[in-house]
Amino acid sequence: MDGPGPLPGPVAVPGLPTLDRPLVMGILNVTPDSFSDGGRWAEPGAAVEHGRRLLAEGADLLDVGGESTRPGATRPVVAEELDRVVPVIEALAAEGACLSVDTMRAEVADAALRAGARVVNDVSGGLADPEVLAVTAAYEAAYVAMHWRAHAATMAEHARYDDVVGEVRAELAERLAAACAAGIREDRVVLDPGIGFAKTAAHNWELLGDLPRLASLGRPLLLGVSRKTFLGALLAGPDEAPRPVGERDDATTALSALAAAAGAWCVRVHTVAPTLDAVRVGARWREAAR
């Protein structure tokens, strides 16, 4: 059997941990309408406590998001998003946590970076609000550019590709160039293929099966697959009903191990402890396969 492909080993992104395995990013949704945890952490105090639990389980960084990007979601106004994320970031940053803000808005990115975030995780790759790029550059923060074609309410209409890997690669290359043109240093840019965003299940699997082609852009890859719909479809029962969201963690853990074996830089997940075990196994497998 062929090896996992020519992805790089551990990559240093300035300001973030550098380890001999992929990083584990814990998801901290502070929205009332998240697809997976449905507002359980929408109150700031509850969110901070959950963030502490994820860190205690071994999360290398936390991704704090105040806007749901589930299919069909409507956007909060800017003031709502700020009220959701800034207090949580301030509290956890004061305790020494490494934090990312999951936002498409320059105003939110600016407030979050002032509050102590080190990363802007922009699911639109700068397309929704190009000023995000300049804000990130001004703070010399790390930037995750995800592949994106439209907001959640309409993204399913854009899941059309002749060559999904080639087209996603080309569109990510454009976002990388835009980030660098805005002043973000290339060594601070991470790319994300946008699993589940304007993609069918078949598209998601094609992308996961050809990560080296995406990594040929020369930047580390972040993968966000946790509990997503395509896993529910894969695990459907005899009645063809998708596996419920809360019962997809084992599949997520399996994918995290495979991602580590393939050389991913980071995995973004809801459950940290099993994922940490998985990426250690995957990274060791990769090392042995060389």
Image (cartoon, rainbow, N blue to C red):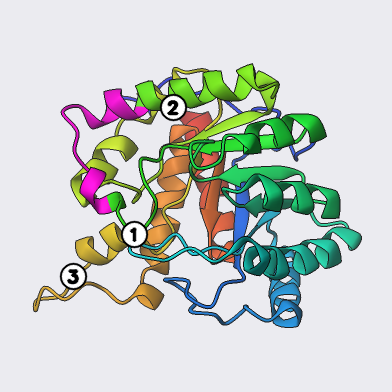
Furthest residue in direction left, as rendered: 239
State the SS at label 1: loop
The residue tagged 2 is 172
The residue tagged 3 is 236
Q: Of tags 3 and 2, which is closer to the observer?
A: 2
Please name the amino acid that badge 2 sits on: Leu
Please name the amino acid that badge 3 sits on: Ala
Task: Assign the N terminus to one quadrant of the image.
Answer: top left
Query: Height in image: 75 above or below 212?
Result: below
Q: Is residue 164 magenta?
A: yes
Please name the amino acid that badge 1 sits on: Ala
Q: Position of residue 56 (x, y in %)?
A: 74, 68
Q: Of tags 2 and 1, which is closer to the observer?
A: 1
* Left or right: 273 in relation to 93: left
Query: Which stretch appears magenta?
Result: 156-168
Pointers 2 and 1 in contact (CB under 8 A)?
Answer: no
* Left or right: 148 in relation to 106: left
Pointers 3 and 2 in contact (CB under 8 A)?
Answer: no
State the SS at label 2: helix
The number of numbered badges drawn on the structure is 3
Name the residue located 42 percent from the left edge and 71 percent from the top edge.
35
Q: CA distance from mark 2 to mark 1?
A: 22 Å
Query: Who is closer to the viewer here, 237 or 116?
Result: 116
Q: Position of residue 39 (x, y in %)?
A: 54, 80
Q: Position of residue 286 (x, y in %)?
A: 48, 33
The residue tagged 1 is 153
Q: Is residue 45 magenta?
A: no
Pointers 1 and 3 in contact (CB under 8 A)?
Answer: no
Marks 1 and 3, the one that precedes in the sequence:
1
